[in-house]
Image (spheres, rainbow, N blue to C red):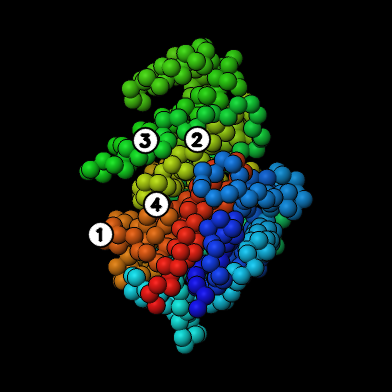
Amino acid sequence: MRPQLVIVGAGPRGTGLLERIAANAPELYAASGLDIHLVDPHPPGGGRIWRQEQSPLLWMNSHAEDVTMFTDDTVRMDGPVREGPTLHEWAALDGRTFADRQLQGRYLRFVYERALAELPPDITVHHHPTRALRVGGPREGRQQVWLEGRARPLLADLVILAIGHLDAELDQEQAALAAYARTHDLVHLPPDFTADTDLSALEPGEPVLVRGFGLAFVDLMVLLTEGRGGRYDGDTYLPSGREPVLYVGSRRGVPYHSKIGYDWSGDRPPLPRFLGPAEIAELRSRPGGFDFRRDVWPLVEKELGFAHYHRLFTAHPERTTSAWADFEEKYAAADGPAERDALAAAAVPDPADRLDLTALDHPLAGVRHASHEDLQDGLRAYIEADLSRRHDPSHSADLGVFLGLLSVYGQLVRLGDIGPWWHGFFSYLASGPPGPRLRQMLALSRAGLLRFLGADMAVTAEDGVFRAAGPTVPGYAVMARALVEARLPEPTVARARDPLLRELHADGAAETPEGLLRVDPRDGRLLDGAGRPHPRRFALGPYTDARTPGAFTRPRTGGPAFRQNDATARAVLAFLGAGAGRAAA
């Protein structure tokens, strides 16, 4: 019988695996024939998140020139580089365009079809448009993958889980809010993929509390304004009359930083510098393990500061008082953040040119407004300042930090589960909305349809309504009959609605303290409680402790997901090519 490989998930990650299988097969797979079974109820390529059947109003949050599914020589991998077009090259778009997600879905379909065409003739792909329910089978024998609506399982020599974002059962707080909403005839929309959320219960003109100010909020804002017939005339929003009034707050109380709106020029910072493979290896080898805040964050801070000041000193030397070589030497020798801050204060006269990560993470810390209207003015000024800075190349040290963030993320995926804070911080600085979306926020704010609530927003359910308040405007609160949690569900195995993940966990797959599946960082094999890699089961994606910032990335930035895909593809092909998969049925 021909070897059988089952890949659960046919979105960008599954598509990327196929591309790497096609690239590596000529070197590693000399066996005769292979059947690859792709299991996903959504179309291959885009999968659920990037499917073509969604609102054309929803955009990507990256420029078209910054999106690729193809490797280049910056990806540190053992397999061959197979270059291909970026989104903007494939679609013949202006590279600075923010493409809609329908177009990205078509691009991903192209990548999928190209991968199929590049597979050797005796490797066949079968798409099963359904869900995988569970995986069984002995460690050393063939696996059985049970599919919804199919009486007999697929037999698999190897199984790869390439699932993306998942639905989740409600946590304790969300369950209590949902129960309160049912009892008092309120509307409670829990964390979800916004494009799949039924928003029809949010009625025109009514106040809606929204907790979350990231990309999920941007989608919600679009669908409840333009999606309901409103339109923009320059910087003015012309309402349709069908919009609710959104009261939004979050931990930080501000939207994610705008995407940077200018191109790189000059020398890139030589990264990694202070957080590279050697430092990661040392952290992983510590007998007692490591603590992120104590052991890892100081290296991250130093790396991001290096990227920032390298750009400032080399591109804007007139705003510094010393030569880069002298500053770099002292920066490398500095012991701790206090010494680095003193060095920067002496060499960089303008505080706006210095990097303060704590202030960036807590932009409203200590900020108090006398009234709700004062807060609206203050937040509009904050957003306008962010837009101005992120589109001004004289502040291109920010772009240096962005490259530093990409480098750091590529290293940290090797450490496993480091907790949720870092991923949120990365997204806040590096994966924010397009500038035009923030301009739309300003227009909606001026129109009175978007109201800011500030930092540390707290939601309670009392007196038959939801109540939101926070310290940014002391004593101010908003009551509403509708509450939306504008964020994706946390990717925890224990609360995943996906029965496949729950069954794997019950079957011995190990879970991190944060609820992620533990995998071997070398090739993605599932680990059990004793740390043993499963010989026939692999997992890649946001629900694992090797999660990356995305299944696709900007060109020439090393793409950690590409590195992972390559390592997994090579391990799979070597295993199947050696005949190991057929040794025990």
Which residue type does callout 4 highlight?
Answer: Pro
As measured in the structure, the alpha-carbon distance from the residue carrying label 3 to the one carrying label 1 is 25 Å
Q: Residues within 10 Å of mark 3 (few under 14, many from 20)?
A: some
Q: Does residue 54 show up?
A: no
* Residue type at the position of mark 2: Gly
* Left or right of 272, for residue 286: left
Q: In terms of depth relative to the viewer, which is nearer, 262 or 6? A: 6
First reached walking from the N terminus: tag 2 or tag 4: 2
Could you tell which of marks 3 and 2 lies nearer the N-terminus? 3
Label 2 Cα crowd, 10 Å radius (few <14 / some 14-19 / many 20+): many
Horizontal placement of 454 versus 316: left or right? left
Residue 329 against residue 11 in the figure, above or below:
above
Residue 193 location (% of width, % of height): 52, 63
Label 2 sits on a secondary structure element that is: helix
Mark 4 lies on a secondary structure that is loop
Q: Are marks 1 and 4 in contact (CB under 8 Å)?
A: no
Numbered tag placed on residue 404 in the rendering: 2
Is residue 408 visible in the rendered structure shown here? Answer: yes
Amino acid type indicated by mark 3: Glu
Q: Position of residue 113 (x, y in %)?
A: 67, 64
Q: Amino acid at mark 1?
A: Ala
Q: Nearer the viewer, mark 3 or mark 2?
A: 3
Picture disc at residue 521 = 4
Q: Which residue is mark 3?
A: 279
Q: Give the spatial CA distance, label 2 vs label 4.
A: 22 Å
Does residue 378 lie above or below 129 as drawn? above
Q: CA distance from mark 3 to mark 2?
A: 16 Å
> Residue 75: x percent and y percent?
54, 44
User: Along the horizontal axis of the image, is 353 left or right of 81?
Assistant: left
Residue drawn 37% across the image and 50% down it: 416
- Residue 530 is labelled as 1
